[in-house]
């Protein structure tokens, strides 16, 4: 990988072009909230990541990057992990359960699981044995947001300023969230998630001015949600083109944060 390092930074957010497993550009015990949707290992065509390794290798990789996040989080830091409930491409696997177990092996404590109902059942193409009990596929059109924490759930650090509204708090503490997914074509990335996902996690699980990290920042959606909700964002991605996509997208949607900006040449 060439020219890794700080891709862009200003007083609002920082984009790091580097490998999550080896980077030294995030300080230990410096992050309040990690929100991420890691590669799902379902052969999505990323620029710089192989997404069709063996399931054993995928779980080993997951343990390594989650260990890094554990180190970066503060003692009262939280971790919102967006993953599939399960998968059937290349063989059925209980992805959500397996990654939750690995997170606990790393040292995380489990808090809860939010079910994200994407409502995309109409896109189904695999039924297994059609109208037969021989080998049907059961496919739930949902994903998970597993909520974990490092040492203690009660948050004692930070500004103590919450910006969540009464109706938002009531709606979002119901662990079934329904909103649409994001368009790959519109964003220009093979696996974007909608900004509603990090927006809810940020407002529910962090204070104003907290540091929010996405170690697979991709098109920069988590950073955009952080900036728009008065948090400091850190995005990390192994692909330079995605870092540049994120930079352009954040500065284009939120142009007021261009002041005092610096870009690595």
Image (cartoon, rainbow, N blue to C red):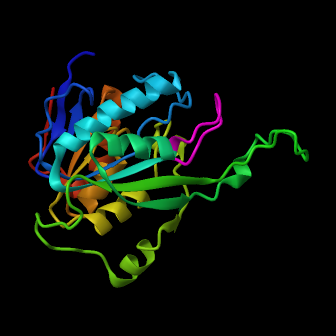
**Do we see residue 219 in this rendering?**
no
Direction from residue 128 to residue 203 in the image, left or right: left
Q: Quick one: which residue is furthest to the top in this view?
A: 2
Residue appearing at x 33%, y 27% in the figure? 239
The dominant secondary structure in magenta is loop
Q: Quick one: which residue is furthest to the bottom in this view?
A: 166
Direction from residue 156 to residue 179 in the image, left or right: right
Residue 29 on the magenta span? no
Residue appearing at x 59%, y 37% in the figure? 93
Direction from residue 125 to residue 188 in the image, left or right: left
Q: Quick one: which residue is furthest to the front in this view?
A: 105
Q: Nearer the viewer, residue 254 or 92?
A: 92
Q: Which stretch appears magenta?
A: 84-95
Dividing the image into 4 quarters, which one contains the C terminus?
Answer: top left
Residue 184: x and y, percent?
52, 42
Choose top left, top right, bottom left or bottom right for residue 229.
Answer: bottom left
Direction from residue 170 to residue 248 in the image, left or right: left
Residue 197: x and y, percent?
42, 58
């Amino acid at each position: 990988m060439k020219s890794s390092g700080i891709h862009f930074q200003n007083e609002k957010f920082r984009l790091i072009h580097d490998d999550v497993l080896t980077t030294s550009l995030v300080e230990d015990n410096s992050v309040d909230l990690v929100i991420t949707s890691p590669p799902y290992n379902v052969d999505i065509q990323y620029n710089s990541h192989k997404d069709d390794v063996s399931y054993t290798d995928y779980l080993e990789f997951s343990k390594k990057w989650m260990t890094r996040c554990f180190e970066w989080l503060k003692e009262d830091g939280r971790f919102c992990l967006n993953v599939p409930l399960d998968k059937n491409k290349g063989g059925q696997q209980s992805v959500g359960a397996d990654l939750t177990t690995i997170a606990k092996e790393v040292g995380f404590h489990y808090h809860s699981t939010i079910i994200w109902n994407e409502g995309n059942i109409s896109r189904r193409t695999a039924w297994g044995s059609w109208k037969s009990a021989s080998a049907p596929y059961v496919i739930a059109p949902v994903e998970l947001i597993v909520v974990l924490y490092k040492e203690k759930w009660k948050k004692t650090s930070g500004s103590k300023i919450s910006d969540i509204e009464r109706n938002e708090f009531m709606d979002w503490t119901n662990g079934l969230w329904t909103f649409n997914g994001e368009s790959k074509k519109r964003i220009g990335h093979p696996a974007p998630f909608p900004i509603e996902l990090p927006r809810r996690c940020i407002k529910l699980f962090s204070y104003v001015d907290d540091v929010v990290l996405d170690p697979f920042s991709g098109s920069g959606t988590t950073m955009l949600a952080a900036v728009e909700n008065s948090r400091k964002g850190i995005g990390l991605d192994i692909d330079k083109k995605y870092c540049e996509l994120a930079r352009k997208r954040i500065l284009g949607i939120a142009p007021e944060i261009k002041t005092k900006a610096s870009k690595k040449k």
